[in-house]
Amino acid sequence: MNEPGTISHMSVGKNRFRPNEQVIEITDPAEIERIMNTFSEVKLRKTSRVDHGDNEYEVWFQGRNGPTFAVYFFSSDHVRIYNGSSNHKRYNREYKIVNDFDFGVIENLFK
């Protein structure tokens, strides 16, 4: 993923395409860096089984000079990664988060 300083803005969506959909735009560089730092230590394992939670979240990172990068949260520990610039085999695949991850950094944006 890009360095925090190269991200121009983020969009964080909750329950896309549902009646209770919400979207937040984040442009504050300090907030972008805080969220990206939370993702920096995430460890993933490929999975073919995805647990869906009550809420789904999307986090879109828009680079200043580059493509969009997104993480879709099916639940607090199951994600799909999307990289608009590449069809590399590690993208568009489901993963399980296998280490401690503070999912509250995403949920708390909607409180």
Image: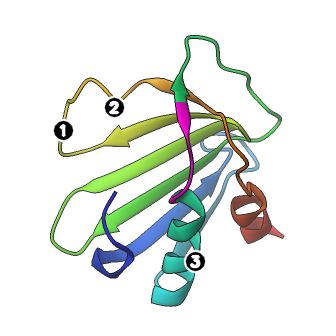
Front disc: 3 or 1 = 3
Quarter occupied by residue 22:
bottom right
Identify the residue at horizontal 30%, vertical 64% (top origin): 2
Q: Amino acid at mark 1?
A: Ser
Q: Are marks 2 and 1 in contact (CB under 8 Å)?
A: yes
Q: Does residue 91 appear left or right of residue 23 in this picture?
A: left
Mark before the other along the chain sequence, 2 or 1:
1
Q: Are marks 3 and 2 in contact (CB under 8 Å)?
A: no
Residue 78 picture location, percent across and down: 64, 32
Q: Amino acid at mark 2?
A: Tyr
Which colour scheme appears in the figure? rainbow
Residue position for label 1: 86
SS assignment at label 3: helix
Count residues near mark 2 (Cα–Cα under 10 Å), then give few for <14, some for 14-19, many for 20+.
Answer: some
Quarter occupied by residue 67:
bottom left
Q: For the magenta stretch, what is the residue range?
A: 40-44
Count residues near mark 1 (Cα–Cα under 10 Å), then give few for <14, some for 14-19, many for 20+.
Answer: few
Identify the residue at horizontal 56%, vertical 82% (top origin): 31
Mark before the other along the chain sequence, 3 or 1:
3
On residue 51, which mark appears?
Answer: none
Q: Amino acid at mark 3?
A: Arg
Residue position for label 2: 91
Magenta span contains residue 42: yes
Residue 76 picture location, percent across and down: 74, 41
Residue position for label 3: 34
